[in-house]
Image (spheres, coloured by chain):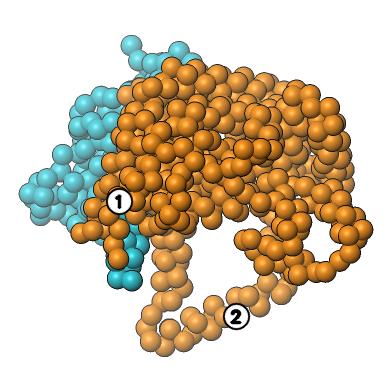
């Protein structure tokens, strides 16, 4: 019963705090959500029109659309974060040198953001929508390749590799220029180049994986992989059990029901919370920090045990900064953020999953309600009616999601502070029901 | 230790509940389904479709040509389709049936006639006698590009008693189906 009470306490805290913050920030959140949506739709529409000219231009527009969408998410999270005074709640030194500008946050969060979108097929869906729009407006045709121009078979492997390398170099140069000059627009340009770079990697990489799978299927040794299956069939056949049917059913249950549910209802919320913690700036160490301190905080790498001289160390640091900048800026913070949100305990985890899942399912049901209300129509109708419906649903659910992520992160910080016995940097600042140290500590915890 | 295990058990239950809700949501139809009764006309984009009657039997003749004898039985549903849309439709109808949780495919396609014409034809299914009660004819207008397409579920109104009576009367009868007669809409 204590576990249930703890869960209910966290649920109550999340719902009331998120509701209050949502209400207080509603106008700003709505404007941000609408501008983000409009920006994304503008570039997506442009991508749909430009695909007839060149798939590369189309992809560039799509990547700009994703950058705009991410910008809206960051701004929305920061609006909610300001209301919750999250920055003040994180115990950071007074002279914390971290850059909290939007462009810096964009460059830091773009990779995990597009990573989440790639894992959950949002990028592929966006690319598919471009193709569908093209077919709706230009007629269904197989004579002209649409986005398949971007596949290694369409454009040629070396063209793809050349574009990826060129974009990587361009991004590094713009990054360097941005850091030396401090010009804010350059940060946005860098983010857009990176978005384009990542989209090409994601879409082309997917094609490479498919090609690899086809290549393996065409090889003679592929038959060897079937031998264990045939052996199992023989063994279970003797017992009167059709093992292939059993495995097919199990596989179907896993891939069609369980895994989509796990990824949408458990993995995705955790990844978004990790991304939110990147935006709010959790205390994360880069690979270079680990090296300078001479001891890894989170991961025990072989490199951390190396003993080198000062000169060698400086050279190695410069080399590391040049070639492992992405590791510092993105991968390690993302990894640390996932650790952060996983480490707060089961009841909070359950409460967060329930709240986030309710918003996800609510969004789906709302969309369904609109579609069912309007009835069946051809694709041309949905091409026109789909965007306004999408906007309406976005305006209802997206601000709620941002507020929930911010509130959950704030609660994470309070719980960590309570657990470690340290006071929060700014306690009692949460509107409505503040999850201060006292409050977090008052949560009934089972022995 | 036990308390922590209980907490994690609760978290797993919460996750399973949300996964179940997600699976339930995934079962929502991808089509705009409309229920109609036997004899009731319903629109499917530019066409109107009406299920007029149904017959059962074990021997099938189509347009007076012997087709075959079924190991189970045939069900022929007579339908009338009228296309009053001024332009030719480019949709593809998927005709089937459902009963007792089974999905059945029709023996032949059902296509909307040209604009300004009406066609009356039989849609034939081969099915188990147990699946006769509660049989529903389904017609889905699947557009070339997937959308939230309309689907008609036409309930033939076959109750368990009705099915038993009809099986008693015509289980081994001959079904004479027509592949279609075209008429101009006047």
Give the number of the mark in front: 1 or 2. Answer: 1
Determine the image quadrant of residue B158. top left
Is label 1 on the same chain as label 2? yes
Q: Residue at x 69, y 55 (%)?
A: A209
For disc 2, the neighbor class at 10 Å (few under 14, some 14 to 19, many from 20) is few
> Chain B appears in which tint?
cyan
Is A212 on the left-hand or right-hand side of B15?
right
User: For mark 1, what is the residue?
Assistant: A443
Query: Relative to B48, is A401 above or below?
Result: below
* On screen, residue B105 above or below A140: below
> Looking at the picture, does residue A131 appear above or below residue A35?
below
User: Percent position (x, y) of residue A99?
Assistant: 68, 34
Q: Nearer the viewer, residue B48 or B30?
A: B30
Q: Position of residue B74 (x, y in %)?
A: 27, 51
- Location of the C terminus of chain A by quadrant is bottom left
Seen from the viewer's position, the closer of residues B114 and B85 is B85
The reply to whether discs 1 and 2 touch (Cβ–Cβ < 8 Å) is no
Q: Is residue A249 left or right of residue A38?
A: left
- Name the residue at 43% across, 84% down: A236
Chain to which mark 1 belongs: A
Residue B110 x/y as whole percent? 40, 36
Asked if residue A363 lies left or right of residue A105, the reply is: left
On residue A227, the disc is 2
Q: Note whether residue B30 is visible.
A: no
Residue B174 against residue A87 in the figure, above or below: below
Q: In terms of image quadrants, where is residue A445?
A: bottom left
Depth check: give the residue in front, B11 or A428: A428
Q: Secondary structure at mark 2?
A: helix
């Amino acid at each position: 019963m204590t576990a249930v009470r703890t869960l209910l306490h966290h649920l109550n805290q999340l719902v009331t705090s998120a509701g209050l913050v949502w209400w207080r920030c509603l106008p700003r959140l709505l404007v941000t959500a609408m501008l983000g949506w409009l920006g994304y739709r503008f570039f997506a529409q442009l991508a749909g029109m430009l695909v007839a000219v060149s798939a590369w231009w189309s992809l560039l527009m799509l990547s700009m659309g994703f950058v705009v969408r991410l910008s809206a998410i960051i701004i929305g999270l920061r609006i909610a974060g300001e209301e919750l005074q999250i920055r003040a709640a994180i115990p950071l030194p007074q002279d914390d040198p971290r850059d909290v500008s939007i462009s810096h946050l964009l460059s830091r969060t773009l990779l995990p953001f597009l990573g989440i979108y790639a894992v959950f097929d949002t990028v592929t869906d966006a690319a598919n929508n471009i193709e569908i729009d093209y077919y709706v407006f230009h007629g269904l045709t197989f004579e002209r390749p649409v986005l398949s121009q971007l596949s290694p078979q369409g454009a040629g492997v070396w063209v793809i590799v050349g574009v990826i390398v060129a974009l990587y170099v361009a991004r590094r140069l713009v990054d360097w220029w941005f850091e030396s000059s401090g010009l804010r627009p350059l940060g946005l340009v860098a983010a857009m180049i990176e978005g384009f770079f990542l989209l090409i990697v994601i879409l082309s990489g997917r094609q490479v994986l498919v090609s690899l799978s086809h290549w393996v299927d065409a090889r003679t040794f592929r038959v060897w992989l079937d031998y264990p299956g045939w052996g199992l069939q023989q063994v279970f056949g003797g017992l009167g059990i059709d093992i292939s049917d059993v495995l097919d059913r199990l596989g179907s249950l896993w891939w069609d029901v369980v895994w989509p549910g796990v990824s949408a209802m458990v993995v995705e919320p955790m990844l978004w919370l990790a991304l939110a913690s990147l935006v709010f700036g959790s205390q994360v160490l880069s690979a270079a920090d680990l090296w300078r301190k001479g001891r890894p905080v989170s991961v025990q790498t072989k490199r951390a045990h190396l003993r080198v001289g000062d000169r060698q160390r400086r050279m190695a640091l410069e080399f590391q900064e040049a070639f492992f900048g992405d590791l510092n800026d993105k991968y390690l913070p993302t990894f640390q953020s996932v650790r952060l949100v996983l480490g707060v305990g089961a009841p909070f985890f359950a409460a967060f999953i329930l709240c986030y899942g309710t918003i996800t399912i609510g969004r789906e049901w709302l969309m369904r309600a609109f579609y069912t209300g309007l009835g069946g129509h051809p694709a041309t109708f949905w091409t026109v009616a789909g965007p306004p419906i999408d906007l309406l649903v976005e305006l209802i659910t997206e601000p709620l999601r941002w507020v929930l992520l911010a509130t959950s992160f704030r609660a994470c910080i309070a719980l960590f502070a309570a657990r470690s016995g340290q006071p929060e940097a700014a306690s009692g600042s949460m509107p409505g029901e503040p999850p201060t140290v006292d409050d977090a500590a008052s949560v009934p915890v089972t022995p | 230790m036990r308390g922590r295990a209980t907490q994690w058990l609760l978290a797993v239950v919460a996750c399973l509940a949300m996964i179940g809700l997600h699976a339930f949501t995934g079962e929502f139809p991808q089509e705009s389904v409309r229920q109609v009764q036997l004899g009731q006309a319903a629109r499917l984009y530019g066409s109107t479709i009406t299920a007029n009657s149904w017959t059962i039997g074990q021997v099938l003749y189509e347009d007076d040509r012997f087709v075959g004898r079924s190991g189970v039985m045939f069900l022929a549903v007579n339908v009338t389709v009228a296309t009053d849309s001024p332009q030719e439709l480019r949709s593809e109808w998927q005709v089937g049936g459902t009963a007792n949780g089974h999905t059945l495919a029709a023996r032949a396609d059902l296509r909307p006639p040209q604009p300004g014409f009406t066609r009356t034809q039989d849609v034939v299914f081969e099915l188990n006698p147990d699946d006769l009660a509660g049989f529903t004819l389904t017609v889905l207008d699947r557009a070339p590009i997937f959308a939230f397409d309309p689907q008609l579920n036409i309930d033939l109104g076959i109750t368990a008693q009705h099915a038993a009576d009809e099986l008693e009367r015509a289980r081994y009868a001959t079904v004479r189906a027509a592949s279609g007669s075209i008429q101009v809409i006047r």
